[in-house]
Every structure is written in C-alpha cells, then in structure tokens.
Image (cartoon, coloured by chain):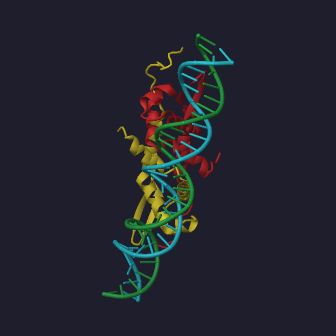
Chain colours: A red, B yellow, C green, D cyan
DNA sequence: GCTTCAAATAGATATTTGTCAATATGTTTT
DNA sequence: AAAACATATTGACAAATATCTATTTGAAGC
C-alpha cells in the first residue's frame, strides 16, 4: 500500500513536462493513435514515443496495440491511483507539534 | 479556471523528485521548520532551500515566516487544486471516436 | 553597532532530461 | 519474401535540474 518515493515520482513525472500535459489533454477527447498525436504535436516521432513511454509508465495513460497501430487513452484507474497518492501525501496526521526551535 | 500546461507542470514538479516527496512526507506529521527538515534530510542547507522553493511554488506547501525561522506545512488548498487538476485532466469527455487510422 | 544564527542567493559542476537523426523491430499488404 | 508503414530503440547533443561551496540577507540578542 505504501509506495516508495521513487514510485511516486514515476507517476507525477508524467505531468512535469508541458508536452506531456498537452498530450493528456488531447486524450481527454478519447482514444488516439500515435500517428494522430504525432500530427497534433510539434514533435518528432521518436520524441513522441519517448513521452508516451513516460506517460504509460506513470499509469495515467494506457496503450492498446492493434496491428501496426498503438492506441493511447487515459486510464481512469491510473488517475485514481494518482489522486489517492496526492491525497495520502497531503493528509496531515498531526502527532505532536514539537518544533526544533523550541518556541511556542 | 483552465490552467496553462506550464502552470500544471509547476504543480507536479513538486512530486517529481524523491527528496521532495520525502519532505512532504515529513510534513504529514505537522508543521516543521527548515532547520528540522535539514536535520532529517541528507542535504546541504542551500539544496533544501532550493527544494522548499519548488514545493512552495507548487502550492502544495506553504511557508510561514516567524522571526529567523520559516515553518513549512502542507497546504490543504494546494492539495485540492492538484487533485482537481488531475481529475480535470483525466476525465474523458468523449466527443467522437474518429480515429486517424480509419479502422473500425 | 556588532555578533550570531536561519534562510536565501550566486556561481560552479555533475547528472538528468528532452530532443532529433538514424536505425531497428514488427505488422500488414502485395 | 519483399515492400510499405507504424512505432520503438540507439546514440548524440543541448537544455534543465540537483547539488555543493561560498556569500549575502535579514532577524535577535549582546
């Protein structure tokens, strides 16, 4: 249940690059194949491929291979994991308010 | 309401580095001053300062200055923005399933 | 005002990341 | 099997990032 810091960074690395955010926004309109994403993004084919790998590694996007084509779409499960992760990270479980500085 | 790709990357850059995730986890236990974080992290003071700036820029963490010290804590509002952001990005609004490849 | 302490900034450097051209892999069609 | 096409991998390079040491800023206490 508890993820390593490394695992968490892999999820959110997806959203650390403007082009990847743009790609996810394209996928909001439904499944797209790589060739279509390539048309819409101003990137070379290998660069797009690189970004799609990072997006898939994050779990936020899934690729469905069909013959020559790969169809990408947003993963609702991946999104849920990411949201739960942020929620977990940011829910404060105040134990004691001891401060190193000794004030208060 | 709609954020630029750049703005989104600023939020999630916070969670792209293992040390920053570790810092947020420390803040789960309540507010901490920089000196205490410095003790717990294996980083130089300037490096910690650098990470705290990125965390604050993301909105997930807020710094409260008090005399010489700066106290950091998780921002519930920032967390909510981040979650809404992921939710927005990943909620598919299927319009038409036209595919560039013409199959189906 | 001077000293002390906490945090930020500047400058330098090593590592990581994004990008592209070239090539490889794998699938479909002929 | 060969050709055509979609995608992935490799290798090179530029830009961004993480890190450190040294210095600066700013607040408290003497």
Q: Quadrant of the C terminus of chain B?
A: top right
Query: Is residue A28 in view from this perspective?
Result: no
Percent position (x, y) of residue A92?
A: 52, 54
Q: Say if B25 sits above or below D6 in the image.
A: below
Tell me what residue is drawn at x 50 percent, y 35 percent: A48
Tell me what residue is drawn at x 45 percent, y 26 percent: A29
Q: Quadrant of the N terminus of chain B?
A: top left
Percent position (x, y) of residue D20?
A: 53, 68
Percent position (x, y) of residue B61?
A: 45, 55
Tell me what residue is drawn at x 42 percent, y 61 percent: B63
Q: Say if B46 sits above or below A58 in the image.
A: below
Q: Is residue D10 left or right of residue B101?
A: right
Percent position (x, y) of residue A80?
A: 55, 37
Query: Is residue A58 in view from this perspective?
Result: yes
Q: Determine the image quadrant of residue C2.
A: bottom left
Q: Say if A53 sits above or below A68 in the image.
A: below
Q: Determine the image quadrant of residue A53.
A: top right
Q: Say if B64 sits above or below B91 in the image.
A: below
Out of D3 and A68, give the one closest to the viewer: D3
How many labels sit on residues? 0
Out of B28 and D5, give the one closest to the viewer: D5
Out of A90 and A65, give the one closest to the viewer: A65
């Amino acid at each position: 249940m508890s993820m390593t810091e490394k695992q968490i960074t892999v999820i959110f690395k997806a959203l650390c690059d403007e082009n990847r955010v743009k790609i996810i926004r394209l996928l909001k309109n439904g499944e797209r194949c790589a060739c279509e994403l390539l048309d819409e993004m101003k990137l070379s084919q290998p660069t797009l491929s690189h970004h799609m790998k990072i997006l898939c590694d994050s779990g936020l996007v899934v690729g469905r291979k069909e013959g020559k084509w790969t169809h990408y779409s947003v993963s609702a499960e991946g999104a849920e994991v990411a949201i739960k992760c942020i929620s977990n990270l940011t829910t404060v479980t105040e134990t004691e308010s001891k401060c190193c500085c000794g004030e208060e």
